[in-house]
Amino acid sequence: MDMFWLNHEQLLKGVNLGFQRYLSRQVKWDRRLIGIFGAKGVGKTTLLLQRIKLAYGDSHEALYLPLDNIWFQERCMLSETVRQFYEEGGRHLFLDNVHRYGSWVQAIECLHDDYPDMQIVFAAPLLVEGEKTEMPFDGKGDWYTLHTMSFREYLSYEGALDLKPVPLDELLLNHAEVTQQVMDEVNIVPIFRNYLEHGCYPFYWEDPDAFNFRLPDLVDVDLPAIRQMNNAMFRKMKQLLIQLAQEAPEFPRMQALTSKYEADNTHIHRLLGYIKEIGVLRILQVRKEDGTLARSYRSFLANTNLMASLFREMERVYVGETFFVDQMSNCGTVELLHNGDYRVNEKYTFMIGDPLMDYERIKNVENAFAAIHGQPKSVGNKIPVWALGLCY
């Protein structure tokens, strides 16, 4: 037990409370059971440690336990550790990397039942998010997803501008005033360029020189153990991921994929499901004019940082589309329409492009906007694409 307390105390010493992610203000911290989900590298551990330091300080009321610790892997001593923690007065348990602990859902359920006056907060990768609905907690828990840093958060982290999140409805109603306010305060162009290259993941600031080398690690998750897939399937999934990333936004025909990977449609769709779970690629299915889904897709790397690390030269419209899909997907729903436009939250239509494109067809259309990469300010219903990064 002393070893865990020592690790807990050492980690808290390095925690900075100067900047906190958007989710820290949204979580209902008084709930007994809280799950924080998110892709690898988005800052889940920091979120847990900041909460402990802010709410409990040096008190032993709260304990941080990383379940990827070798002690839990080899000796399965979680229940005994928690028993000691509780008997010493601990009432707030923070479990990290729970996916590395065998039968973790059942383990947390037992702790939840055995200690009715103890709070449990756990963090897990995005790839197990689909299991949330299967958790046998009778709706007693609150589940949250921590996304990559928004452009608004990056502005704050860099000390350029502190701005509260602007809900999309409010932003689209007042986008000219909002964008002008931001541009009056900062030179937005170089800051936005930096964000596109390295602003999505908090670990950039730990070692900027190693950032591009660490990004590929986001793919190396514990998927084989969690999804009970063999190594051959995992290798095939990574090969498919690399192909889709290289060919994005174009998406290969399904027949070509089944032929190349010697697999049927069901197997390919299973691999695509794994790819989406990892959180490094988004695949949007085209919605036809009659509202039904077509058998065609477009794929997008999860964010522009991944694009910048993989490709030296990035086509401007695709950069704008990737940024748009990323930011809007993190705070709403995004659909890809048959004509290449996007529909957000089933209400707003967006045409994505650069300043040289023709936007006349949406000029007088209700709830239709152009999100433009490279436009300095809002004009009519044309909005700089960076403004859509202020929503969370």
Image (cartoon, grey):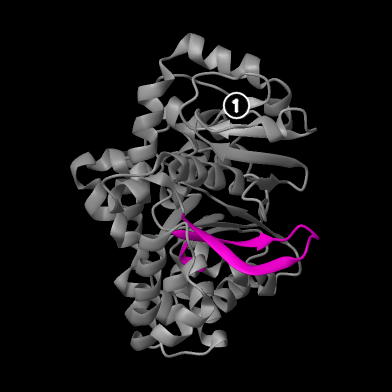
Q: Residue at x 46, y 46 (%)?
A: 318
> Within the image, what quadrant is residue 50 found in?
top left
Q: Residue at x 59, y 78 (%)?
A: 106
Work out whether 168 lies above or below 134.
above
Q: Main secondary structure of the magenta part?
A: strand
Query: Where residue 104 sits: x, y (%)?
Result: 52, 75
Taking the image as shown, residue 212 lies to the left or right of residue 118, namely: left
Q: Can you say which quadrant of the picture contains the C terminus? A: top right
Label 1 CA crowd tier, 10 Å (few <14, some 14–19, many 20+) = many
> Within the image, what quadrant is residue 81 found in?
bottom left
Toward the viewer: 191 or 52?
191
Q: Residue furthest left?
A: 209
Q: Residue at x 41, y 81 (%)?
A: 225
Q: Residue furthest top?
A: 184
Taking the image as shown, residue 286 lies to the left or right of residue 65, namely: right
Q: Residue at x 47, y 19 (%)?
A: 161
Residue receiving disc 1 = 383
Query: Is residue 168 visible to us here?
Result: no
Query: Where residue 359 sits: x, y (%)?
Result: 63, 32
> Within the image, what quadrant is residue 17 found in?
top left
Query: Where residue 344 sits: x, y (%)?
Result: 69, 45
- Give the amino acid type for the residue marked by disc 1 in the picture: Ile
Magenta region includes residue 342: no
Label 1 sits on a secondary structure element that is strand
Q: Can you say which quadrant of the picture contains the N terminus? A: bottom left
Q: Residues in magenta?
A: 277-301
Magenta region includes residue 287: yes
Toward the viewer: 280 or 1?
280
Work out whether 35 lies above or below 230.
above
